[in-house]
Image: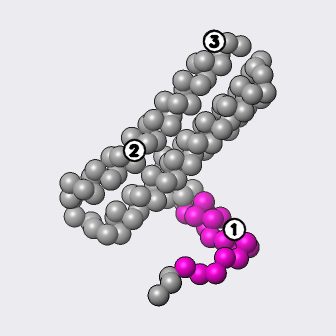
Amino acid sequence: MNNKPKYHLFKNTQYALSGLVHALKTESSFKLELLCAVFIIAGIILIDASLTQKMILLVTGILVLIVELINSAIENVVDLVTLEKHPLAKAAKDIGSTAVMFSIGLHAACWILVLLWA
């Protein structure tokens, strides 16, 4: 049996927006990163750098938000499956957090390189 509903652009957009609203209501890390993104975007606009460098900063900044949302989804699924402390549940959550850390590190490294070359 197929559990996937038919694709509908407006319905799928509604699901995505519902996910965003849920993340804004429940995920403090996402809210903090989104707040930082406002200042980062302002910095990208104000910095004296090429369009390519600005796009790299913008893309890596958005990547941080994307990875945080995926991490939050992983954490929610783990919590749905088990509320017990289990080594695999901890590993799944820790690996998701590592992905967020790496995306933030990548973004910071891009900022450092752009500032050194600008």
- Describe residue 113's horizontal placement relative to residue 87 as left or right: right
Task: Give the colour scheme shown.
Answer: one colour
Q: Which residue is mark 1?
A: 13
Q: Residue furthest front?
A: 1
| Quadrant in the picture for residue 113 | top right
The label on residue 97 is 2
Residue type beneath disc 1: Thr
| Secondary element type, mark 3 | helix
Count of numbered circles on the image: 3
Ranked by sequence position, the earlier of labels 2 and 3 is 2
The label on residue 116 is 3
The reply to whether the magenta stretch includes residue 7 is yes
Residue type beneath disc 2: Ser
Within 10 angstroms of label 1, few (less than 14), some, or many (20 or more) residues? few
Q: CA distance from mark 3 to mark 1?
A: 40 Å
The majority secondary structure of the magenta stretch comes to helix
Residue 61 at what x, y percent from top left?
Answer: 61, 37
Residue at 27% over, 67% down:
82
Ranked by sequence position, the earlier of labels 3 and 1 is 1
Residue 18 at what x, y percent from top left?
Answer: 61, 67
Residue 22 visible? The answer is yes
Residue 35 visible? The answer is no
Residue 28 at what x, y percent from top left?
Answer: 49, 49
Ranked by sequence position, the earlier of labels 1 and 2 is 1
The reply to whether the magenta stretch includes residue 17 is yes
Span colored in magenta: 4-22
| Quadrant in the picture for residue 108 | top right
Residue type beneath disc 3: Leu
